[in-house]
Image: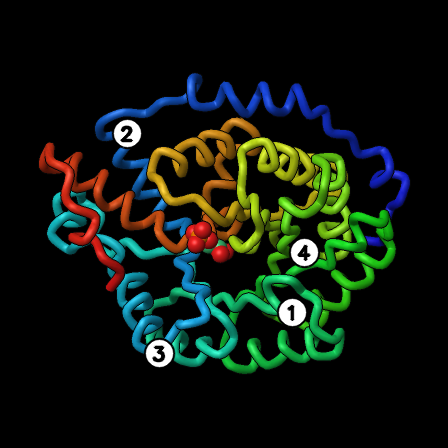
Amino acid sequence: MALDLDWVMAAQANTSAIERRAATIGGRRSVKKEWQAAWLLKAITLIDLTTLSGDDSEGRVKRLCAKARQPVRADMLEALGMPGLKVGAVCVYHDMVETAVRALEGSGIPVAAVSTGFPAGLSPWKTRIMEIGESVAAGAREIDIVISRRHVLTGNWQALYDEMAEMRAACGEAHVKAILATGELGTLRNVAKASLVCMMAGADFIKTSTGKEGVNATLPVSLVMIRAIRDYEARSGIKVGYKPAGGISKAKDALLYLALMKDELGWPWLQPDLFRFGASSLLGDIERQLEHHLTGRYSAANRHAMG
Ligand SMILES: O=C[C@H](O)COP(=O)(O)O
């Protein structure tokens, strides 16, 4: 849709109310035993299994893709009655897209590429747009772009809208996730406004963080973003997805996010087309909890190494 500046300027965020609400989620929603195991299995299907390190290699990415196909030990999945469970996607840097696409062939698991000069998003504009095209050509079906934080900090909503719209167009058929880098946006009100602008400009998902900011995904920021998604759907009829990313490494945290999504947006946002966790180490902890559910014992983390 066109940029609706009146709507953007009217966006509010009551920080103390948001923090209060976020703090109550853990107390209000606590699932145990087989219900917890079921929610953890659900969480696995929603993970963008990620490696975004300077020392990524083909070997590491192939191992990650093997893990994406078989995220939990076969005997455990059998015991849980969930053979064939897979993650939502594999997320890598551009250089690793081809390797990941090859390793995931036939699995139906899409490859997501971080793009546009990730994580800072400060490379030349043409290069950023070209990078999207290269990753799509290499087989990425999802592109995680980063926005220019300065457009938010200076209130230049038109520039943010134009940038997002051009990146959306460059993605073609690929889904685009807009990374807001919320830890660098100053205020929750800015987060609300940037969320709206990115959705107006065509983002399929809004995502909190690159995982490289000082502060990454948090529950208060999530509440602001998912309420923007709710408003946007109410006014436009369009459902936009949500991806909290960065620092989500514990099964119990994943459960809090899922509870929040169910409370605020309902069941459609607990499916991989509208919700993902961006996480590099969450799966290992979920496996440990599932093993505990099955055997009553916690295993060492290295029993659930990646790949
Ligand atoms: O988008 C995904 C993030 O970069 C992953 O962050 P993490 O390594 O803290 O899980």
Closer to the N terminus: mark 4 or mark 3? Answer: 3
What kind of residue is marked 1?
Thr
Numbered disc 2: secondary structure: helix
Label 4 vs label 1: CA separation? 14 Å
Q: Where 225 falls versus 121 (above or below)?
A: above
- The residue at the far right in this view is 6
State yes or no: discs 2 and 3 in contact (Cβ < 8 Å).
no
For marks 3 and 1 on the same chain, the one whose residue lies earlier in the sequence: 3
Q: Amino acid at mark 4?
A: Ala
Q: Report x, y in % for residue 175.
A: 59, 63
Can you give x and y, in whole percent of width and height, for residue 55 in the image? 40, 72
Which numbered disc, 2 or 3, marks the residue closer to the eye?
3
Q: Secondary structure at mark 1?
A: loop
Q: Which residue is mark 1?
A: 116
Estimate how packed mark 2 is, as few (under 14), some (14 to 19) or many (20 or more) residues with alpha carbons within 10 Å.
Answer: few
Residue under the point 32% across and 25% down: 31
Q: Nearer the viewer, residue 52 or 104?
A: 52
Secondary element at tag 4:
loop
Name the residue tied to disc 3: 58
Amino acid type indicated by mark 2: Trp
Can the viewer see residue 23?
yes
In the rendered structure, the answer to whether residue 104 lies left or right of residue 20 reads left
Distance from the alpha carbon under mark 1 to that under mark 2: 40 Å
Give the mark nearer the N terminus: 2 vs 4: 2
Q: Amino acid at mark 3?
A: Glu
Q: Earlier in the sequence, mark 1 or mark 2?
A: 2
According to the image, label 4 marks what residue? 203
Residue holding disc 2: 35
Q: CA distance from mark 3 to mark 1?
A: 22 Å
Considering only vertical position in the picture, is 241 above or below 66? above
- Can you give x and y, in whole percent of width and height, for residue 140 in the image? 51, 72
Q: Are marks 4 and 1 in contact (CB under 8 Å)?
A: no
